[in-house]
Image (tube, rainbow, N blue to C red):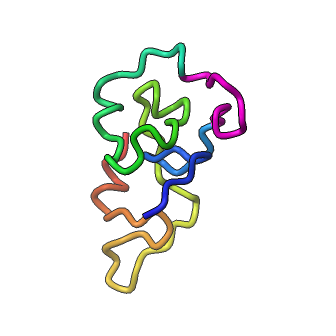
Amino acid sequence: MSVDPNRCPLCGRSNACAVAEGAAKCWCFDLQIPDEAMARIPESARGEACLCADCARGVIPSPCIRVCVMDDKGETCLGCKRSMEEVRDWP
């Protein structure tokens, strides 16, 4: 799987990475990223792509894309791919 240096490896949103755009330094260089967030980065993406600001702060963004349609069995949302329980229990 290839890693997009312009996308957060955790949530897939833009990471606004200055290094990926050719700069010598990125906004994240001066940020203390929680160990929990760092531990969630897939091994293949380490050193390849920055986290987005939310993921770097430890905020887990909702995977909701506002396409709330359940599958034929009524078990999984076709938009965000979460189960009914995950949708219901999301903070």
Return the residue found at the far right: 22
Bounds of the magenta segment: 16-28
Q: Nearer the viewer, residue 89 or 1?
A: 1
58 lies above or below 21 = above
Residue 22 among magenta residues: yes
Location of residue 86 in the rendering, given as x and y in whole percent from the top left corner: 31, 55
Location of residue 59 in the rendering, given as x and y in whole percent from the top left corner: 43, 31
Q: Going 47% across and 48% down the picture, which residue do you hit?
A: 11
Q: Nearer the viewer, residue 67 or 8?
A: 8
* On-image quarter of the N terminus: bottom left
Main secondary structure along the magenta-highlighted residues: loop
Return the residue found at the far bottom: 72
**Relative to 77, 26 lies left or right:** right
Location of residue 2 in the rendering, given as x and y in whole percent from the top left corner: 48, 61
Number of numbered discs present?
A: 0
Q: Going 72% across and 35% down the picture, which residue do you hit?
A: 22
Answer with the quarter of the image where residue 87 lies. Answer: bottom left
Q: Going 42% across and 69% down the picture, which residue do you hit?
A: 77
Residue 61 among magenta residues: no
* On-image quarter of the C terminus: top left
56 lies above or below 43 = above
Q: Going 34% across and 53% down the picture, which residue do you hit?
A: 88
